[in-house]
Image (tube, rainbow, N blue to C red):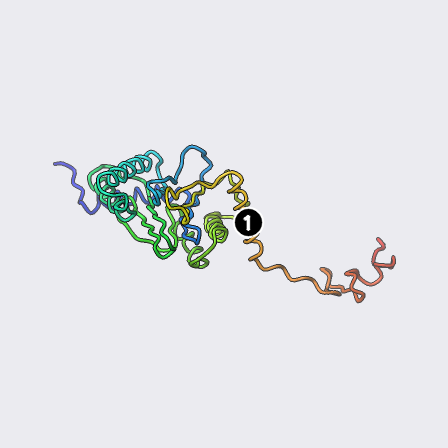
Amino acid sequence: MPFYVSPEQVMKDKADYARKAITRIRSGVVIACDAGILFVAPNPSRALRKFSEMYDRIAFAAVGRYNEFETLRKAGVRYADMTGFQYDRRDVTARGLADWYAQLLGSLFTDSNKPYEVEIVVAEVGKTEDTDQIYRIIFDGSVAEEHGFVVMGGQADRVATVLKERYAAGMTLTEAMTLAIAALNSQGDGPSPDPVTADQLEVALLERSRTHRAFRRLSGARLESLLADAAKQDGAAKPASPAQPDGAAQPDGSASPDGTGQPDGAANGGPAEQGG
């Protein structure tokens, strides 16, 4: 007799396989701000990109297996170009692309032996922050509309918790970058991770003020300046340690009545400084 596996078990095994693979990678963050839509993800490679332009005001972001999401990106660009050529450029929208990706990934998940190990985001910047469109599509074709921010892959729950606590509409680009770095650092196990450098990140922006080809990459001196401003803002937001008042107790329990911080007799060569 042929070996039988129920359809429910097959789908569950496929979903578990893809979900575990995506959890092992580093997360990426997409945040809306007053300047546009910001994309931030750890990526030391200068050639293999996670973010790219799709159309005039639409961008593509993905995490997972590079060969798989690169295939999806190229197919989406062809679909957008063909739609704009056959009909009108205004007919190419993030919602239309998200629906198309959902159908494609859903078919691949159902019909193929191995699902795609990817999570993708299609974002379109609007004239105002209220008109931004951000859609998240996962490996089984499920699509969700997100507002304000979205996290892709990795320890998404932990990163999203930081974003929910600190995100606010109308953030500046520097504030959005500060929040993105803080959220991504929450994946680490150490209490105080090392400062993130420009070489470790891939950063892009769908710029709201542009009317055509809004996507641009932030790198080099521009990214370093943005990271420096974000670090200053993050440092200013942290509460400073309280200053020690005059005559405060010393570690050994002694106090200085004259405010010098030395025990009695130490300042003028008394017994406190003698070695016995």
Q: Is residue 222 above or below residue 191?
A: above
**Within-10-Å neighbours for mark 1: few <14, some 14–19, many 20+:** some
Q: Position of residue 126 (x, y in %)?
A: 35, 51
Q: Decide: is 246 above or below 47.
A: below
261 lies left or right of 183:
right
Question: Label 1 sits on what residue type?
Answer: Asp
Which residue: 50% across, 51% down?
174
On the image, the x and y values in percent for residue 177 come to: 48, 49
Q: Is residue 38 left or right of residue 197?
A: left
The front one of 145 and 90 is 90
Image coordinates of residue 136 in percent, x first then y, are: 32, 48
Relative to 137, is 74 above or below?
A: above
Q: Residue furthest left?
A: 1
User: Which structural element holds mark 1?
Assistant: helix
Residue visible at 27% across and 40% down in the picture: 80
Residue 66: which quarter of the image?
top left
Left or right: where 140 falls relative to 191: left
The front one of 190 and 34 is: 34
- Outermost residue, right direction? 269
Which quadrant holds residue 160? bottom left
Where residue 60 appears, as percent x and y from the top left, is: 35, 42
Residue at which label 1 appears: 229
Q: Is residue 271 above or below residue 21?
A: below
Quarter of the figure with the N terminus = top left
Which quarter of the image is occupied by the C terminus? bottom right
Quadrant in which residue 216 is drawn? top left
Q: Residue 62 or 130: which is nearer the viewer?
A: 130
Q: Answer whether residue 141 is visible to the viewer in this image.
A: no
